[in-house]
Image (cartoon, rainbow, N blue to C red):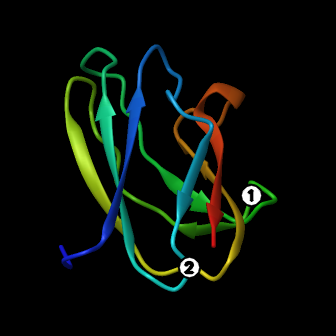
């Protein structure tokens, strides 16, 4: 992991993310540490999409319940993006990533 890379913390519990807003620095790689607090067998991931919530920019493998993963993302241009669990694309597992 590159030194100085920003790592954002996110927890999934009861099929919902604990945060609706994340922010990352523009033009720099960043990471999201996902803690999956749901039971084993309930997998989650954190996909970065365009602000339309449909166009996938960066897909990551899922992590099973009771485990955690650190996802590395490539640098993004300034703007607003959607972070979402592609397995449970519901409002509780959708948030806004602001890159500036």
Residue at x 56% of width, y 60% of height: 48
Q: Nearer the viewer, residue 34 or 6?
A: 6
Q: Is residue 87 above or below residue 33?
A: above
Horizontally, is 25 left or right of 72 in the view?
Answer: right
The residue beneath circle 2 is 26
Q: In which quarter of the view is residue 99 placed?
A: bottom right
Residue at x 53% of width, y 41% of height: 85
Circle 2: element type:
loop
Residue at x 74% of width, y 54% of height: 53
The residue beneath circle 1 is 54
Circle 1: element type:
loop
Indicate which disc, 1 or 2, sits on the residue closer to the N terminus: 2
Q: Position of residue 34 (x, y in %)?
A: 33, 42
Q: Position of residue 88 (x, y in %)?
A: 57, 32
Q: Gap between marks 1 and 2, in whole Å?
A: 21 Å
Quarter of the picture containing the N terminus is bottom left
């Amino acid at each position: 992991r590159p030194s100085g890379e920003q790592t954002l913390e996110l927890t999934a519990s009861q099929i919902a993310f604990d945060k609706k807003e994340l922010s990352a620095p523009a033009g720099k790689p960043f990471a999201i540490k996902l803690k999956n607090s749901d039971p084993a067998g309930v997998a989650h991931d954190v996909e970065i999409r365009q602000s339309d919530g449909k166009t996938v920019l960066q897909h990551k493998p899922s992590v099973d319940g009771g485990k955690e993963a650190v996802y590395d993302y490539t640098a993004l241009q300034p703007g607003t993006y959607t972070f979402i669990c592609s397995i449970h694309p519901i409002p509780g597992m959708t948030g806004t990533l602001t890159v500036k």
